[in-house]
Amino acid sequence: MNFEEHLNKVKEKCECCQKCPLSKTRTNVVFSDGVPNNKLVLIGEAPGYYEDKEGLPFVGRAGQLLDKILNSVGLSRKKDIYIMNTIKCRPPENRDPEPSEKEACREFLDAQLDILRPKIILLCGNVALKSMLNLPYGITKARGNWFEGPYGSKMMPIYHPSYLLRNDSREKGSPKWQMWQDIKEIKRVYEEIK
Ligand code: URA
């Protein structure tokens, strides 16, 4: 079986999941988008309003900004990156996922990573950061640094695009400027990977 076939089996199971109360309020399970590959994966937080409606991650305003950031270094979700979330169903009013919801959903995240074993994992925002790394500090300090991840991967925490939408400055040292440094570094390491 190839990546796609393995992932489809997990997706089928995920689409029937009723392990947490979010299964009652979801319109769609949001499993993934992009290309299954063993180089580059991004883990976001949770589906929002538009993601829940469409069944795809990062399709709202934050997603459009994410696409722009990727495109700025020649990466695209159509050919280079597999995108998923920490949890697969939308929390009401876009609140942060509860620990019990993250725990219930963990098997799907772990299965996706186990199938792909990607060389680079981007942890997009605090929720993804906290679910993959046990650090005594948050995204502001962690972003832009490489950490050891599962299966010998390199993980980099990056700002969530929703945060960048709320912080518009592009001045040196601003979150958008930092994101630009981070995406260039990610592209550099991506190019080195065979
Ligand atoms: N924010 C996320 O973290 N994931 C999405 O899919 C959409 C917005």
Image (cartoon, helix red, strand yellow):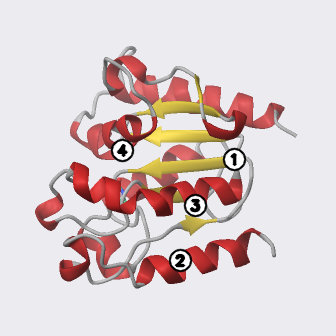
Which quadrant of the rendered structure holds the C terminus? top right
Give coordinates of residue 163: x percent, y percent: 27, 39
Q: Amino acid at mark 4?
A: Pro
Q: Provide the secondary structure element on which disc 3 rests.
A: helix
Mark 4 or mark 2: which is in front? 2
Q: Amino acid at mark 1?
A: Pro
Q: CA distance from mark 2 to mark 3?
A: 10 Å
Circle nearer the N terminus (3, 1): 3
| Residue 14 in sight from this viewpoint | yes
Question: Which residue is pictured at 60% across the width and 50% down the height?
Answer: 41
Q: CA distance from mark 1 to mark 4?
A: 22 Å
Mark 3 or mark 1: which is in front? 3
Crowd rating for badge 4 (residues with CA inside 10 Å; few <14, some 14–19, many 20+)? many
Q: Amino acid at mark 3?
A: Ala
Q: Amino acid at mark 2?
A: Lys
Circle nearer the N terminus (2, 3): 2
Return the residue at label 2: 11
Kindly check if marks 3 and 4 are in contact, taking CB atoms under 8 A apart as contact: no
Circle nearer the N terminus (2, 1): 2
Q: Is residue 3 left or right of residue 160?
A: right
Return the residue at label 1: 118
Q: Provide the secondary structure element on which disc 2 rests.
A: helix
Return the residue at label 3: 111
Mark 1 or mark 4: which is in front? 1
Which quadrant of the rendered structure holds the N terminus? bottom right
Question: Which residue is pictured at 36% across the width and 60% down the height?
Answer: 87
Return the residue at label 4: 161
Front residue of this view, candidates 121 and 98: 98
Q: CA distance from mark 3 to mark 4?
A: 25 Å
Q: Provide the secondary structure element on which disc 4 rests.
A: helix
Circle nearer the N terminus (1, 4): 1
